[in-house]
Image (cartoon, rainbow, N blue to C red):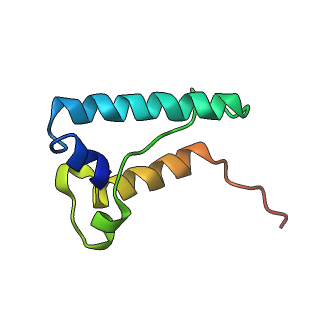
Amino acid sequence: ADLLAEDCGGVDSEEYAEMMELVEMELRELLDTYEFPGDDTPIIAGSALMALNGEDENELGTTAVKKLVEALDSYIPEPERAI
């Protein structure tokens, strides 16, 4: 995300939002190509480096990690365990 933000003039720019939309569309098409559920797969934009440094500019750091964890918890079913 940092590279995209720099190339587009900052994460607040309209160009950045358009770029992120295009990247998401491409990812979903790629998932569909390999027979994964592209339309149903959660895609979370973020920066692991920002999160690691405790930063959260435009919710791309720690907030993005929290969103990712929530998406994983809701998307991946909890396995059944034999008792």
Quadrant position of residue 22: top left
In the rendered structure, the answer to whether residue 75 lies left or right of residue 10 reads right
Q: How many marks?
A: 0
In the rendered structure, the answer to whether residue 2 lies left or right of residue 72 reads left
Q: Residue at x 67, y 53 (%)?
A: 78
Quadrant position of residue 7: top left
In percent of width and height, residue 25 lies at: 47, 27
83 vs 67, nearest the viewer: 67
4 vs 40, nearest the viewer: 4
In percent of width and height, residue 4 lies at: 30, 46
In percent of width and height, residue 60 lies at: 28, 52
Q: Which quarter of the figure is the C terminus placed in?
A: bottom right
In percent of width and height, residue 74 lies at: 54, 45
Q: Residue at x 50, y 31 (%)?
A: 26
In the rendered structure, the answer to whether residue 26 lies left or right of residue 79 reads left
77 vs 37, nearest the viewer: 37
Tell me: residue 68, above or below residue 51: above
Q: Residue at x 38, y 58 (%)?
A: 65
Question: Which residue is at the far right?
Answer: 82
